[in-house]
Image (cartoon, rainbow, N blue to C red):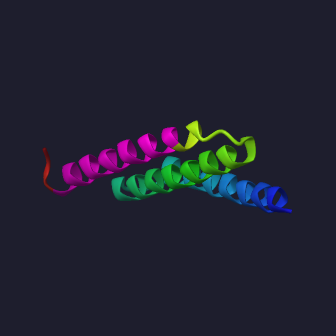
Amino acid sequence: MVETILTIAAGIMLLSLILSIIRFIKGPCYTDRVISFDVMTIASLAIIATVAYLTQRIIYLDIAMVYGILSFLGVLVVARYLERGL
């Protein structure tokens, strides 16, 4: 039962990832692209966590944490650059 719910949730997360990729490509300004990049990161973190649960491998959660920290720092750098330059 849990695996079925997580599989459906992974499909929804994959759909949100695809929609944010489309927004990243079509985004009329840089802020739209930064926000869609952040959404892509969150969706991929959720997919990694779901895969970690389904495969019973805890090492994927460590990878997800490092990926989350690096993406947060990347968004901060880009936001600071867009705000007033480096």
**Viewer-closest of 71 and 57:** 57
Residue found at x 39% / y 45% = 71
Q: Is residue 23 left or right of residue 75?
A: right
For the N terminus, the quadrant is bottom right
User: Could you tell me if residue 39 is visible in this image?
Assistant: yes
Residue found at x 26% / y 54% = 79
Residue found at x 69% / y 55% = 15
Where, by quadrant of the figure, is residue 52 drawn? top right
Where, by quadrant of the figure, is residue 74 drawn? top left
**Viewer-closest of 26 and 78:** 78
Residue found at x 19% / y 57% = 83
Secondary structure mostly seen in magenta is helix
- Where does the image place residue 58, in percent across and percent down from the top left? 60, 41
Q: Is residue 71 left or right of residue 4?
A: left
- Where does the image place residue 73, in percent across and percent down from the top left? 30, 47
- In this rendering, is residue 32 above or below 86? below
The magenta stretch spans which residues?
A: 62-83
For the C terminus, the quadrant is top left
Q: How many marks?
A: 0
Decide whether residue 5 is among the magenta residues. no
- Where does the image place residue 80, in percent across and percent down from the top left? 20, 53
- Where does the image place residue 43, in percent across and percent down from the top left? 57, 54
**Viewer-closest of 72 and 27:** 72
User: Could you tell me if residue 21 is visible in this image?
Assistant: no
**Viewer-closest of 4 and 43:** 4
Decide whether residue 65 is among the magenta residues. yes
